[in-house]
Image (cartoon, helix red, strand yellow):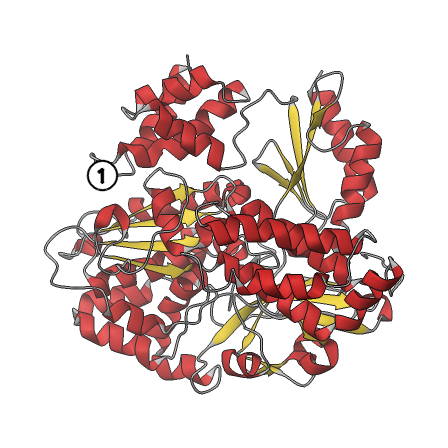
């Protein structure tokens, strides 16, 4: 676990200090003053939401949807139960930022969720945590106990009329539960199979009640925005791309880990922060936003800045900020085969185009990699992909198709070479 | 079928959810049951379902959908190794090959002495720490070089005696 550069969420957090995650440590660095400020001033809910809107905070889970706008969709006059849910089901290959947030600074997330509950008039919330990081789940539960004991959660928070309680729920090995409606199904104790939308969670969410779901990093950015102001957050990034963002860097760099840097930072700078390319090898390709984001050639990446708009203009997605770096020794067929296997394994099986299509993609790529590729296999991959993308309930099918399309577009010659010569164009080495 | 300690833990899970939504506790309850018994037999799944007042099939659906539940006996130590792309680039595949060689088993197999089961896992959300292993679902081991794997296996081997 490693956090290197720091911005909004990790500012002042001494990750080398084993108690940096505690309530006392969080309060010592100004934690919970944003919440106290709201409660003491009895700030109107609209003002809190306006502040989040002004900050240009965009959803950090992958979609980049404006957080303030999402909060405004919650029917505030709804008479019955309403929920907020945090999506900490971080399983997108390449992404490992929420784990570090909850491990080193869980109270930032808790305070962010309390403020969200205040703004939307919600009394109960859940944090759905990826099952594989069970030790993080246990620490988060301890942090919740601390907050409860200090009167920051539960009935009449800090002596006010506002009550809210928050609980942790763990997954147990299903990538699909990172999809928000699959997550809700799972939270209800069912198989994590996505729901058809509409209705959207804001009107029909957890237990059929209005629900707002945000990513861990989005919620954890909220205390800063309320404490220091939307403009300070916005200034930390670039217009329409407010704030700093956590980038998880993995693959062939000298210092893999999390980097919290202003949106709009050049990729070249980020690569340098991560210690540059391992063993001085040449950069071949980068997946800039988690395994579902289209891959980009290294030279294209070197000219890009890391923000939603720039990456999207180049034909990929900033996604969750997971940057997977590959050097010249990687065979692109082999790399894609690995991802195709993952989506095939993780398809929930509900929609036929995805259940069957992910298997087709994997098997065709597998046979190309193993010297059994046929001349029309690249056309077959395109055809299968076209019958999957946009034809299913959730985006997992699209997520499986994007890498196939982008790998075969940017590195077509490697695939063709494989089919013709029954072997890799490069002398493949994983690391 | 479960100890009072496990049942108390399940009760704490149930208390997290609205009274009419006991089914929400099924994931936690199955995890607690598995922690005690090491794997989930059909009888155990049914027991959990009855404890939560939900149909056995509802609990069985959950147990079969999520891949960290074990529906067959596993070794004393189940080692899951991530071989997904980001981990592979950080030595995950090499770590898996080394484990297979050291334990002399393939994925999905258990050593003859019943101590170790090796499983190929998918993304654990810890790619920066590759190679990553998970021991018995809950204990994550980071930066598992050959030397670190040797040390870990020796430690577990001793614990398993």
Is A220 located above or below residue A234 in the figure? Answer: above
Quadrant housing the N terminus of chain A = bottom right
Residue B125 visible in the shown view: no
Quadrant housing the C terminus of chain A = bottom right
The 10 Å Cα crowd at callout 1, few under 14, some 14 to 19, many 20 or more, is few
Say which element carries label 1.
Answer: loop
Q: Position of residue B131 (x, y in %)?
A: 72, 48
Q: Quadrant of residue A117?
A: bottom left
Is B106 located above or below residue A374 in the figure? Answer: above
Q: Along the horizontal axis of the image, is A42 left or right of A234?
A: left
Instruction: Please report the residue visible at 51 percent of the width from the left and 60 percent of the height from the top.
Output: A388
Count numbered badges in the picture.
1
Q: Position of residue A17 (x, y in %)?
A: 57, 54
Along the line of sight, the residue nearer the viewer: A103 or A369? A369
Q: Residue furthest top?
A: B1
Q: Position of residue A78 (x, y in %)?
A: 12, 59
Along the line of sight, the residue nearer the viewer: A311 or A60? A311
Q: Along the horizontal axis of the image, is A237 left or right of A345?
A: left
Q: Quadrant of residue A76?
A: bottom left
Instruction: Please report the residue visible at 41 percent of the width from the left and 44 percent of the height from the top.
Output: A192
Q: Position of residue A82 (x, y in %)?
A: 20, 53
Instruction: Please report the residue visible at 56 percent of the width from the left and 75 percent of the height from the top.
Output: A261
Residue A300 visible in the shown view: yes
Subunit that carries the residue with mark 1: B
Which residue is label 1 attached to? Answer: B18
Q: Along the horizontal axis of the image, is B85 left or right of A46?
A: right
Is A260 located above or below residue A231 in the figure? Answer: above
């Amino acid at each position: 676990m490693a956090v290197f550069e720091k911005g909004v969420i990790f500012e002042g957090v001494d990750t080398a200090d084993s108690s940096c995650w505690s309530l006392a440590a969080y309060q010592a660095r100004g934690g919970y003053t944003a919440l106290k400020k709201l409660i003491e001033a009895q700030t109107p809910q609209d003002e809190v939401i306006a502040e989040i809107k002004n900050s240009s905070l965009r959803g950090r889970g992958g979609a980049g949807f404006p957080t303030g706008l999402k909060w405004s969709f919650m029917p505030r006059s709804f008479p019955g139960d309403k929920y907020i849910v945090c999506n900490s089901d971080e399983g997108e290959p390449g992404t490992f930022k929420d784990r570090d947030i909850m491990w080193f600074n869980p109270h930032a997330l808790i305070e962010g969720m309390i403020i969200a509950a205040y703004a939307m008039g919600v009394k109960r919330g859940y944090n759905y945590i990826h099952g594989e990081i069970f030790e993080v789940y246990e620490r988060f539960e301890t942090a919740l106990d601390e907050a409860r004991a200090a009167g920051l959660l539960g009935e009449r928070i800090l002596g006010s009329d506002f009550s809210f309680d928050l609980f942790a729920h763990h997954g147990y090995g299903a990538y699909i539960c990172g999809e928000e409606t699959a997550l809700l199904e799972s939270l209800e104790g069912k198989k994590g199979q996505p729901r058809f939308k509409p209705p959207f969670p804001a009107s029909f969410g957890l237990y059929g009640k209005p629900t707002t779901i945000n990513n861990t990093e989005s919620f954890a950015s909220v205390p800063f925005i309320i404490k220091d102001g939307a403009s300070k957050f916005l200034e930390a990034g670039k217009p329409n791309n407010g704030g700093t963002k956590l980038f998880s860097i993995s693959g062939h760099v000298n210092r893999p880990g999390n980097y919290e840097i202003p949106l709009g930072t050049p990729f070249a700078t980020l690569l340098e922060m991560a210690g540059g390319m391992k063993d001085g090898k040449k950069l071949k390709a980068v997946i800039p936003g988690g395994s579902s984001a289209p891959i980009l050639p290294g030279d294209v990446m070197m000219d890009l800045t890391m923000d939603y708009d720039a990456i999207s203009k180049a034909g990929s997605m900033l996604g969750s900020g997971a940057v997977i770096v590959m050097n010249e020794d990687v065979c692109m067929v082999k790399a894609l085969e690995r991802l195709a296997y993952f989506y095939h394994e993780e398809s929930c099986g509900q929609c036929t185009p995805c259940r069957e299509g992910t298997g087709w993609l994997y098997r065709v790529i597998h046979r190309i990699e193993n010297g059994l590729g046929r001349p029309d296999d690249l056309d077959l991959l395109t055809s299968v992909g076209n019958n999957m993308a946009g034809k299913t309930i959730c985006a997992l099918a699209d997520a499986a198709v994007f890498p196939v399309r982008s790998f075969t577009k940017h590195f077509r010659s490697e695939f063709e070479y494989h089919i013709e010569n029954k072997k890799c164009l490069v002398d493949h080495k994983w690391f | 079928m479960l100890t009072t300690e496990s049942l108390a833990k399940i009760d704490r899970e149930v208390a997290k959810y609205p009274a009419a939504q006991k089914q929400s506790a099924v994931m936690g309850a199955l995890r607690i049951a598995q922690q005690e018994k090491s794997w989930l037999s059909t009888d155990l799944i049914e027991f959990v379902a009855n404890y939560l007042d939900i149909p056995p099939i509802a609990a069985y659906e959950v147990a079969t959908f999520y891949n960290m539940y074990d529906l067959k006996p596993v070794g004393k130590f189940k080692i899951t190794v991530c071989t997904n792309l980001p981990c592979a680039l950080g030595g995950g595949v090499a770590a898996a090959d080394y484990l297979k060689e050291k334990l002399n088993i393939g994925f999905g197999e258990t050593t003859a002495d019943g101590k170790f089961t090796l499983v190929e896992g998918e993304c654990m959300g810890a790619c920066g720490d590759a190679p990553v292993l998970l021991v018995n679902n809950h204990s994550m081991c980071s930066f598992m070089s050959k030397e670190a794997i040797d040390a870990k296996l020796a430690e577990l081997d001793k614990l398993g005696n």
